[in-house]
Image (cartoon, grey):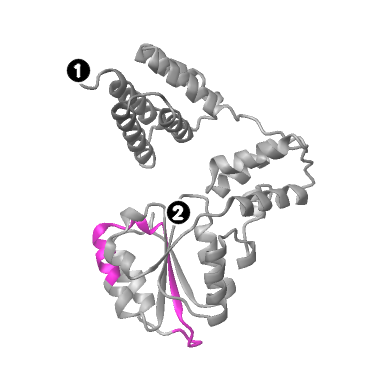
Amino acid sequence: MNFDNLWVERYRPKCLDEIVLSSEDKDFFDTIKQKQEIPHLLFAGVQGTGKTSLAKILVNDILDCQYLYINASDENGIDAVRGKIMGFAKTMALDGKLKVILLDEADNISLDGQKALRNVMEEFAINTRFILTCNYLFKVIAPLQSRCQIINLIPPVEGVAQKVVKILKAENISIPDEQKPLLLNHVKKFLPDLRRIINDVQMFSSSGTLNIRNEHSKGFAETLYKQILQKESLTNIRKYIIENEKEFSNDYRQLQKELFEIVYSSELNESKKTNCMLAIAKGLESDAFVVDKEINCFATVINVYHNIFLQGQ
């Protein structure tokens, strides 16, 4: 399958200089490049921040070493640790260099698998290093975290904006002056998910001119919040959400984030405001694990409704 038309693939970083990093992280990886050696590493961050790309650049471009790649979403049990991982870790590389085991999405490894992994990391550290990536750091057990240097990948706004503009220029997309602040706002809105930002910008550029649309999710969230305050029936509220999904690009996670900011800035008393924000935060946490995003979002709305009107009754 040809993915050349996808900007996220066409402009996927191939070397360290093409990765958008904070100044501190760039200094750290420049040091690794000079020393040609790494500790055990754990890259943490939401989807789309470049964790996997950075890990592959480390083993292919910087260390140029023998490595084993495992997607822990597919191979996440203790058998994978005892078989494939241990089998690779215990042998020396033919060129005498360090070997690396890249465990992508390591937060999906089972508890037993993570417990077995900590011993493998210690026993074979003399010739094998581990690079782990995860979306949710709390799902990685503390003994594994303590064995790694943890890097929270949060690309800076300026760096992401520059990369996006560079892509637009490479694709000969014109950027009208009135679109420039909209572009910056879009970057800030969806940061640190660089992959989402690039995909959106490609969609907004289909005509050859940047034309950012669908920037109305906050307005939708404000209307939703007003409906809650007006005690609109929950049936009508859910109908309104479902029938107007295009207004917030079907992005239920972003809708909940916008609702959180509206509640935070509202005139609710501190007790109700706190409980509503906690309810939304719980909905955002659940969003990563549920199958039906709409039902999860509507459950959040119910909890907000409950905390505003039924608290203390």
Q: Position of residue 273 (x, y in %)?
A: 34, 29
Report the number of discs. 2
Identify residue type, mark 2.
Gly
Q: Which mark is residue 45?
A: 2
* The residue stretch that appears in magenta: 93-118
> Was residue 282 drawn as part of the magenta stretch in this picture?
no
Q: Residue at x 38, y 83 (%)?
A: 91
Q: Nearer the viewer, mark 2 or mark 1?
A: 1
Q: Is residue 303 above or below residue 34?
A: above
- Is 37 displayed left or right of 83 in the figure? right
Q: Is residue 67 above or below residue 155?
A: below
Q: Nearer the viewer, residue 313 or 139?
A: 313
Q: Secondary structure at mark 2?
A: loop
Q: Secondary structure at mark 1?
A: loop
Q: Nearer the viewer, residue 222 or 32?
A: 222
Q: Which mark is residue 313?
A: 1
> Was residue 117 drawn as part of the magenta stretch in this picture?
yes
Q: Nearer the viewer, residue 273 or 200?
A: 273
Identify residue type, mark 1.
Gln
Dividing the image into 4 quarters, which one contains the C terminus?
top left
Q: Position of residue 13 (x, y in %)?
A: 62, 60
Q: Residue at x 50, y 60 (%)?
A: 52
Q: Position of residue 258 (x, y in %)?
A: 47, 31
